[in-house]
Image (spheres, helix red, strand yellow):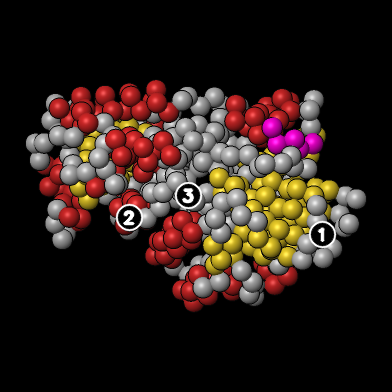
Amino acid sequence: MNDINITAYGATDFVGRSSFLIHDRDHKILLDCGLELVPKQKTIAPVGVHDVAKELDSVLISHAHIDHSGYTPRLSKEGYRGNYYMTQPTKDIAYRLWLDHLKIEGRRHWSETDLDRVFHKISTKDYNKKFKVADGITAEFIHAGHILGAAQILLDWEGQLILYTGDINDRVTPMFDGYDLPNEKVDVLITESTNGDRYVPERKKIDVGLRLLAKQIADQGNKMLLPSFAVGRSQETLITLALDNDLDDIPIYIDGMIVTMNMITEHYLSEKWVSKGFLENLKDAGLNSPFQKQNMIPVKSISERTHQSRRYLAESNEGSIIVTTSGMLEGGPIHTYLDLLGSDENNVMGFSGYQVEGTTGRKIYDGATNVTLFEDYGRKKNVDLNLKIMKFPYSGHTSVDGLKQIMGDSGAKNIFLVHGDKRNQKYIMEYVKDVAKPSLINENAPTPLIGV
């Protein structure tokens, strides 16, 4: 058997452009191919992946988020003609995100032709079904609990088992019951370490606070703004609000790409993709979909002119909840709502997602009361904020407890930490050093996984 190595093109001791090449003398398998999102700048590509594109046997994508999938269409431009493996929900979500990226950044990284070529080479696979990716190598997708369709990737490389977690979540969320583990022990674990030193509270405790506050604000005739990531957090937030009958008389307005992602989610409301408990909750509430409740109102349905609809909502006397993009306030409808509603101290904005350093969201999260809006629209406007800021400690990534569990329960003696900062990784390495060999990976440098 040949030595098996890993080469990282990003996401080593930081979050962004996840892309990992697993390779030996005869085979090359690429796990993820994402972009790095940088505040106020253009996205950064995983430098180095071009060099191996033509040599790849297969490409496997763990989930649709841009930092894991956003550079995938470039592989076609660089000469890769093989299959791209992912789950069906990931295919549907990623395609929409790729189209949106093309609209925002144009053809910097890839073109419509590249996107079309890749789309027709996607082979979708269900969870827990082995499939061949090269001679002597099979793969299997395992539920990750992160977003719809997200998967861990288990490689059987000529008898050696390698588990790449992608992004995983151990907490029970509105749609999932945490991540699953392989049925057998693995030899190598490549795991995210985003929350390597962070305890994440159970969702139910945070959900109660969110719902109570939302009702209180709306009952007083005020507005609650919930900027949210279009994929994942927005659906979780809306489900939490939809399943609370006390909010049935409160309008919940939905703006931005969230509406499209809700429609995709509705296609996958079965036990194959979401938890049985979630489906039972829907049934108990008499719902086929949480997004079809009468008080869930897409902003586009109010008027053909979306900006006019937003102004109407802001100027109305009704109390309401507005769930909108973008999650880190870097652009999108939230800029309009902050301009129209941010000066009123009776309104509230609730943060439910992590805010990256340098983003508009992070500035407000840290206490800034004067921010610049509309930069993405070609003009700048300084706005003074008086609305109240609330923070809800959700996370789409596993807590440190979940990291410890997968490290122990996987049986891996060789553990490689990715997708986290050095402080988190240092903490978790101290925990696991007595039971396994924890390691970091240097970018663009082959690192041995297994050598026989």
Q: Which SS type dominates the magenta stretch? A: loop
- Left/right of residue 38 with respect to residue 283 in the rendered view: right
Res. 108 in view? yes
Q: Is residue 158 above or below residue 368?
A: below
Q: Earlier in the sequence, mark 2 or mark 3?
A: 2
| The magenta segment | 409-413
Residue 263 shows which numbered tag? 2
Disc 3 is placed on an element classified as loop
Q: Earlier in the sequence, mark 1 or mark 3?
A: 1
- Compare residues 260 and 441 and report the one nearer the observer: 260
Mark 1 sits on what residue? 24
Q: Residue furthest right?
A: 452
Provide residue 424's location: percent of width, then percent of height: 63, 31
The residue mark sitting in front, 2 or 3, is 3
Q: Residue at x 20, y 51 (%)?
A: 299
Disc 2 is placed on an element classified as helix
Looking at the rendered image, the quarter that the N terminus falls into is: bottom right
- Compare residues 170 and 19 and report the one nearer the observer: 170
